[in-house]
């Protein structure tokens, strides 16, 4: 292999550009690489710096405003349509997931029409949701007395 002067190892440097392969000196290779990198960066970042005339911002803020207004309308409708005071309405909504949540909100067991009553929580469809155990009817349930009164004998 023949060595060229000024090139260690006798190898020529190649610059890889799309569709071209040229043999250049060290300085020219660096300049060409820098120019190619600058062009690629300009192509990639051009959409970021392009003027959007506020369309993107309007779209983002418009979506956020739509979400906030829908949430406010739902909350307003919830409180206006509810027959209970706002705090009790919030407790009723908090009791929706399951009977554990209803107990935590302090609304269990609940009768039909009362806050905290949801038909899906009424296992035996008797009008009482979140009973102490499934199948027990709260209106018939009486706790068993452990100590019975013993009548005193009369003398």
Image: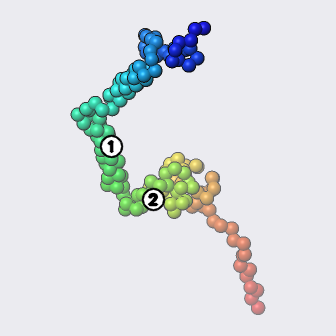
Residue identifier under label 1: 64
Depth check: 47 or 103 in front? 47
Q: Quadrant of the N terminus?
A: top right
Instruction: Relative to 20, say whether 70 is above or below.
Output: below
Report the side of 148 relative to 2 (left or right).
Answer: right
Residue identifier under label 2: 91
Picture quarter containing residue 40? top left
Report the side of 33 relative to 127 (left or right).
Answer: left
**Crowding near the residue tagged with mark 1, few <14, some 14–19, many ≥20 C-alpha atoms within 10 Å:** few
Where residue 115 appears, x then y in whole percent?
45, 58
Helix, strand or loop under label 1: helix
Determine if residue 33 is in view.
no
Q: Quadrant of the C terminus?
A: bottom right
Where residue 133 appears, x then y in whole percent?
63, 56
Residue at the spot x=63%, y=52% of the render?
Answer: 134
- Viewer-nearest of labels 1 and 2? 1
């Amino acid at each position: 292999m023949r060595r060229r002067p000024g090139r260690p190892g006798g190898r020529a440097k190649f610059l890889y550009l799309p569709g071209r392969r040229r043999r250049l000196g060290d300085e020219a290779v660096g300049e060409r690489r820098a120019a190619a990198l600058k062009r690629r960066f300009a192509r990639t970042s051009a959409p970021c710096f392009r003027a959007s005339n506020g369309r993107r911002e309007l779209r983002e803020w418009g979506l956020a405003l739509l979400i906030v207004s829908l949430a406010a309308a739902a909350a307003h409708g919830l409180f206006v349509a509810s027959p209970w005071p706002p705090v009790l309405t919030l407790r009723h909504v908090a009791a929706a997931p399951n009977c554990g949540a209803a107990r935590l909100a302090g609304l269990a067991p609940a009768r039909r029409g009362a806050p905290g009553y949801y038909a899906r929580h009424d296992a035996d469809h008797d009008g009482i949701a979140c009973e102490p155990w499934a199948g027990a009817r709260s209106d018939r349930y009486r706790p068993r007395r452990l100590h019975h009164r013993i009548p005193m004998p009369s003398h």
